[in-house]
Image (cartoon, rainbow, N blue to C red):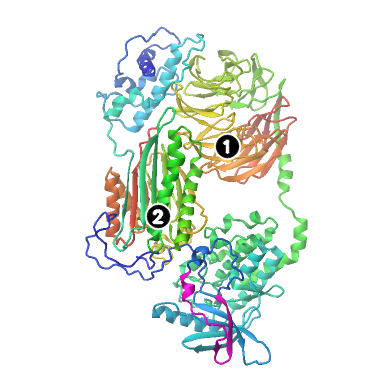
Amino acid sequence: MGLIKRVGTKGLGTPSADDSTRQIPAAESSARVTPPSEEESTRRIQGQPTDEGTKQIPPAPSRPAPPTPAAAPAAPAADIHILPTGTLLQGRYRIEEPIGVGGMSVVYRGRDMRFKDVARYCAIKEMSQTAPDSHTRALNLKNFEREAGLLATLQHPAIPKVYDFFEEDRRLYLVLELVPGKDLEAVLEEVGKPISEARVAKWAIQICDVLSYLHKHTPEPIVFRDMKPSNVMVVGEDRIVLIDFGIARNLNRSDRKGTMIGTEGYSPPEQYRGVAEPQGDLYALGATMHHLLTNTDPRLETPFTFQERPIRQISPDVSIDMEMIVVKALEYDMGARWESADAMKQALVAIIGGAAVAGVAAPPSAPAVAKGTPQTELIWKFTCEDEIRSSPAVNSGMLFVGCYDTNLYALDAVRGEFRWKYATDGGINSSPAVWQDYVIVGSEDGALYACDMRRGSLRWTFRTGKPIRSSPRIDERVVYIGSDDQHIYAVDAVRGAPIWKYRTWNPIRSSAAITSQVIFIGGDDGHVYCLDVRNGALKWKQRTQQPVRSSPVFHEGLVFVGSLDQSLYALDAEGGWPAWRFRTGHYINSSPFVFGSRVFVGGIDGFMYALEAKNGRLAWKFEVGSQITSSPRVESGRVYFGAVDGNVYCLDAGVGTLIWKYPTNAAVVSTPAIADGIVYVGSMDHSIYALKG
Amino acid sequence: MVHIHQSHNQEADTTTDAETPTPASPEAKPDTPTTVPDAAVWWDSSATDAAPAPPPPAAPVVAEEDTPTAPMSLFEIEQARQRLASVAAQVAAANDAPDSGVEASTEPLDATHQLDINQAPALIARRSSQGLAAMAVRDIGRVREMNQDSVFAMITTLPREGTDLTVGLFIVADGMGGHQGGELASRLAVRTIVHQVLSQLVLPALDDNMNAALQPLMISAVQVANQTIWEAAQSLGTDMGTTCTAALLVGHALYIAHVGDSRAYLFEPGGLRQLTSDHSTVGRLIQLGQLDPAEAREHPLRNQLYRTVGQQPQVMVDFVYQPIGVSSHLLLCSDGLWGLIDTPMLEQALKRSPWPQDTCNELIALANLAGGDDNISAVVVSLPLAER
């Protein structure tokens, strides 16, 4: 049973019988109900960091949204006793004004009246006892005494000096050097954008320096335990002073199972297991640097997600070296972090020294292309008599492709040798499909042709009323094809006899996706149709804003399809309603392709997109700079597609970086086919290419 | 009606086809009056052997079954259905002479005939331990004086051109904040989300005007709830908030929007799987392998959430899309349940009764027996059989 109860728990309370929502009487006699020890619960969002230490009062109430929830109704603030200005303590320290209120202390700006002729100011930290129970009070007191004792023994320019320590009116006071300046949180707020790498490095080096001093403290190392921007003051010319040693403590190695102390967002994972080692301070410093370099507050992000927000993605100007230093500091595993503050400092010093050189000399990521291109090998090329818009199909060592010269070509896939061709009465836009030993393709002459795969002899034809630009899709002996005559046909693959047809109100240029029950196909009327495979009955149709020429794909209950309304849709396969849609900058003619958990699609806007199939989130996009109507194919972690700039592209499917590109002499709108590691694709330069990368 | 007849014809024809090895010959004219086909016809895997279509895996034992209405497994039904579909296509092809031109029906067919007549005998005989039903129950527990949880369950059908669609909406919200704030927040969350789904999905679907995308719809529903609660909290001067796990079932897929540490589980054949992740620092550390789940049960910060609905002006909402496949149940619950009952016990309870109501009551009883130190809520959904 937990120590912590939620907000709103009123206490034990016996189960009230009249509560209508109560379903089952708890008849058991067990009275061992745990008392809710802390009424005000931890179960609230920590918009306001509940640090134990001093929090500088913000100079102006201009904070952004986050901390408001706790701030508005902040009950505790009212309870904290604040000394009025002019109060004299010990007959010597005059209270000027409060400058910070923390979880259990108030810090005042004070004036030491012993120096009568000069205004000598100091910081006076007062222990505020708000805890209701004596145990907590005693604990607070102990902490306070420890801080005083500890600080008094330390001597470092980045640690405030202790002047005095006394008790008055049952309150405890610590008189410290007044550090005139702003904390890093305030600095960041003022700047309002990521802070420059050089400046952050300068601060971080000094912080490493003081952490190193603390960690080397004898007899036992001191772990600061609460490194974060608001605990670091910047004085004058970027000099650093650590404030708030409220929770730093002598590292007592037997006391591992302590309670979590620190600030969520900055504290290392092991601190949640009660472990506090010097490496924890390095993690928190890494978190602090990440915050400063990116201006993203870790307290407002999902905890432990620094890796998901790489620094250079947010602030591209930051050097790789700097990012690596922070990444290493932020390792979850203590052993994988910098082994000491000194080691981290040295790495930082190296950057500052080499910054000028590195910044100018090394704009990386160019070599990928340079080394990629020569590796792409042309295995063969076969030239036809007109443009190739059709996409090749490879089957049983043969390649089939349609050409605008009216022929359906059959080539040897390995050597690119001509096997046969079949002449139709029109150009061929449609891409051939192979089923058993039939090759089936549509033609501008309006007919669907089925040829013998080996010899190229005609098996049957099926005539529609207008050109066929859709490509046949075959399943269970049925060919599904759309025609410009506005119909979707199901045709017997063996005999070419019609089984059913479905009428729409515009040409069908999209090709079908087939499941065991239904087909999905797009229409120029802007609809995506879902038809029963058995009889062509309409299950649903879903409207997009513009014609759908992209061909749908079905994957795990979703139908992916592009529309000329510039969106890629994921439609619920059963209802047809969009599950999500992703808007691009121009038409989508390209047909999506699903591989693994991602859907890939090319856009007329010149980008190849990789989206998470389940939610449409962009994984990456790659800019080609010219229209992509070719559809991507993914194999062995690589994405292949053509573009109107005449290149065939090969990208890394995981991250979307270019592996190679191969130039042809005209636009590539054909979709590649991949077999045995060879990429086959047609080009408008009349040739079909077999490439190996 | 016409369509039904057609399929009978095709059915009858299958047998003839099986006997005549040359399917091209159009001699077998199916003018015999149709009756509901004998189940044996489509039981018999040999019926399709003559066709070159994909050979179905042989099921000889089944073929010998003499009662046509013997219970079938889902798998068998599906197999039989697929066999039929391909046979029907072939037969239809055989009926039309290759050169008879395009005479296929061009009239829009009515696809609302949802079940193939050939499945009827099996469907009549089938008795399932699962089928779409839902129950939502919340209980105050044994320690609290107020129930700050809210639950919601709704199942409906919505019209579509051919097939009407089953849609369900299930919500668990676990409120927090003193002075009845928690109750108010969780209720506001449920109310807002239901309003959103009704106005943006249910009503437009009835008007055949549904163009909103489901994922943004669910996410924005929770965001609107966040806004509503935030504004109410501001005006009341409280810091109330709530968790919220809302699952929309559309046919056989789930669209889940989630904030906080209430959970959605899917009961798959392999066991219960948590679909959502808890928005607590402790939960996150477990996810990263930095904290042991056993340690976490006692962790002082285990209830501390880093994301809630209503406690900040904006909220980031997790979204999960999940086809249900052959899963049997969906369970939504607050931490008053999952914090006390471990997964094997949840699984047992889900298996014990086909009735969601029984299951809900059992789960709540178990949580109370384990201490009932928090409000307990559970939404149990027995999922539709995977017929597709």
Q: Label 1 sits on what residue type?
A: Leu
Residue type pointed to by label 2: Ser
Q: Residue at x 60, y 42 (%)?
A: A653
Q: Residue B193 location, x and y as percent?
A: 43, 47
Instruction: Name the residue carrying label 2.
Output: B186
Cβ–Cβ below 8 Å for labels 2 and 1?
A: no
Vertical order, A502 against A113 (above or below):
above
Residue B75 shows up from this direction = yes
Residue A660: x and y, percent?
Answer: 69, 40
Q: Is residue A260 left or right of residue A601?
A: left
SS class, disc 1: strand
Subunit bearing disc 2: B
**Which residues are the magenta region?**
A74-100
Residues marked 2 and 1, same chain: no
Q: Is residue A431 magenta?
A: no
Q: Nearer the viewer, residue B72 or A311?
A: A311
**Quadrant housing the C terminus of chain A:** top right
User: Which quadrant would residue A101 be assigned to in this image?
Assistant: bottom right
Residue A568's tag is 1
Q: Can residue A87 be found in the magenta stretch?
A: yes
**Toward which corner of the image does residue B341 lie, by quadrant?**
bottom left
Task: Tell me if I can see residue A339 in this picture.
Answer: no
The vertical placement of A163 against A265, above or below, is: below
Relative horizontal placement of residue A626, taking residue A43 as reference (left or right) = right
Of residues B258 and A415, the one nearer the viewer is B258
The picture places residue A243, in percent across and down from the top left corner, at 59, 76
